[in-house]
């Protein structure tokens, strides 16, 4: 049950210690439930969402939720910290240029996965290193895979206001 | 029976002189997500002019911003929600939410669900219901964005709560309603008294069903953003007379609700309800109920 989640966390050099009994798979989605929610979820299988959403498997690949990324962020080895301009562009779905990077930790190799942080230490999403960070002098160095701006893109054109 | 003059005259009979109003945008800080983050100072540093809402903790009016506060990184990280000021009131009227089993019967798009989870410190359980697919998606996105951990979502009509076979300590009935002119500039053109009466009937059905799922010592908070008494005082008067409920005194923003509506005398306890005429907020009605005796 936990394998896709733990394998995903390892891409960033993080070892998650999730309690397997608290994680529930519902169709292709994974959720982490507290004991009270677990009792409810077992009582009626008709629910759509419960507890902490961890991610889903789609097209044979694991797609993390943001709460899971934030959990991984607490332990991840692979991380880049970017300046304000690069952070804003990243949240708009753009890749990261070499000049926007303030700090790199963990792997610097092309093809490695890395979390992206702003200068406040907040995880904004993740990407894959596009050029060896030791050698690259300019251009795109981290390709955006997922960023928190996704919340806006999901609801584009159909935002529902709160009354 | 419809049109601006018809409705404005009703408001006059209820003691309010109509004036056009545009409510201010408001945010509510999610305390569960901002530990160690000075979110208000940070937003002010970005040029967002905020004024503390005096009647809800963690609520701020957005007086000016050069960017959409609904697209800021701080919003995307779940540090705050965009929630109209009056709409921030209902969840705060419950006593002692921590560890409780709470029903949010008409939950989408989820602003109040997140607020309940926040007030509960992510303890206990929130059962959130709605029927509309698109609105349910918005609700689930909000729960993910705001890192809510204690909520379970069902696609279920609030008139069928019994299907869950659960008893609740607290029930929030932010019922579907006719809305009000302050948030819908076409309101007077689009709405008729028949719409209002249809919504009032649906609301009574939800009230009746929710009482069956309420623990004996439980609390219901009923809210609408309608100014029409059929959906507000008259429905609560009906609930007091037919469902074994009584109103509970609350300390919150708004006027004491009238106990005489268009010549009809209501139960005196209806004065415990709060009617909020549009001004700095939209129009709103809220009250707290419990089982009698």
Image: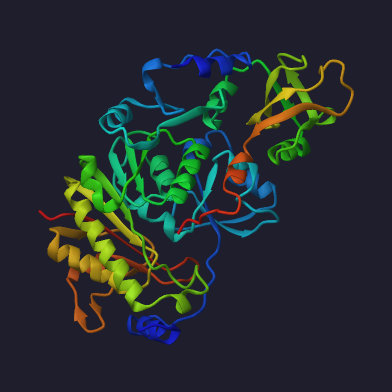
Left or right: B189, with A122 as reference point: left
Q: Where residue A68 sits: x, y (%)?
A: 53, 26
Q: Residue pushed farthest right? A: A137
In the displayed image of the protein, which residue is found farthest to the left? B293
Q: In this view, does B149 lie above or below B288?
A: above
Residue B93 visible in the picture? yes
Q: Using the image as rendered, state which of residue B239 and residue B64 is in the foreground.
A: B239
| Residue ID at (30%, 42%) | B102
Q: Can residue B109 be seen in this view?
A: no
Residue B44: x percent and y percent?
Answer: 65, 49
A77 left or right of B80? right
**Image quarter of residue B148:** top left
Task: Name the quadrant of the N terminus of chain B.
Answer: bottom left
The way the protein has been coloured in the rendering is rainbow
Left-right relation of B14 to A59: left
A146, B148: nearer the viewer: A146
The location of residue B117, given as percent across then percent down, is 40, 40
């Amino acid at each position: 049950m936990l394998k896709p989640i733990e394998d995903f966390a390892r891409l960033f050099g993080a070892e998650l210690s999730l309690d397997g009994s608290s994680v529930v798979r519902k169709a292709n989605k994974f959720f982490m439930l507290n004991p009270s929610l677990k009792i409810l979820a077992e009582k009626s299988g008709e629910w759509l969402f419960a507890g902490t959403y961890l991610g889903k498997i789609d097209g044979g690949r694991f797609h993390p939720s943001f709460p899971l990324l934030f959990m991984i962020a607490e332990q991840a080895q692979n991380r880049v910290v970017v300046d304000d301009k690069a952070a804003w562009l990243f949240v708009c779905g753009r890749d990261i240029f070499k000049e926007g990077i303030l700090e790199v930790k963990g792997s610097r190799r092309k093809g490695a996965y890395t979390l992206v942080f702003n200068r406040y230490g907040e995880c904004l999403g993740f990407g894959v290193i596009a050029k060896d960070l030791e050698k690259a002098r300019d251009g795109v160095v981290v390709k955006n895979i997922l960023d928190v701006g996704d919340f806006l893109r999901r609801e584009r054109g159909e935002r529902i206001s709160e009354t | 029976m419809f049109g601006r003059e018809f409705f404005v005259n009703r408001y006059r009979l209820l003691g309010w002189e109509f004036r056009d109003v545009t409510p201010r945008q408001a945010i509510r800080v999610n305390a569960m997500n901002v530990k160690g983050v000075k979110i208000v100072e940070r937003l002010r540093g970005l040029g967002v002019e905020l004024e503390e809402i005096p009647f809800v903790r963690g609520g701020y009016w957005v007086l000016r911003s050069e960017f959409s506060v609904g697209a800021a990184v701080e919003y995307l990280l779940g540090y705050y929600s965009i929630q109209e000021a009056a709409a921030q009131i209902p969840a705060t009227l419950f006593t002692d939410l921590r560890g409780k089993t709470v029903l949010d019967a008409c939950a989408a798009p989820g602003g109040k669900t997140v607020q309940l989870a926040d007030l509960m410190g992510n303890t206990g359980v929130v059962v959130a219901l709605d029927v509309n697919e698109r609105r349910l998606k918005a609700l689930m996105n909000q729960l993910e964005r705001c890192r809510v951990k204690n909520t379970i979502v069902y696609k279920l009509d609030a008139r069928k709560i019994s299907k869950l076979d659960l008893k609740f300590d607290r029930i929030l009935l932010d019922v579907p309603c006719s809305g009000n002119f302050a948030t819908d500039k076409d309101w007077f053109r689009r709405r008729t008294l028949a719409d209002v009466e249809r919504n009032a009937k649906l609301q009574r059905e939800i009230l009746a069903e929710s009482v069956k799922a309420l623990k004996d010592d439980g609390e219901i908070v009923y809210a609408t953003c309608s100014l029409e008494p059929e959906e507000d005082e008259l429905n609560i008067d009906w609930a007091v007379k037919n469902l074994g409920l009584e109103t509970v005194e609350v300390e919150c923003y708004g006027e004491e609700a009238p106990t005489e509506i268009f010549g009809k005398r209501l139960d005196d306890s209806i004065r415990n309800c709060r009617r909020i005429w549009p001004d700095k907020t939209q129009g709103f009605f809220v009250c707290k109920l419990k089982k009698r005796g």
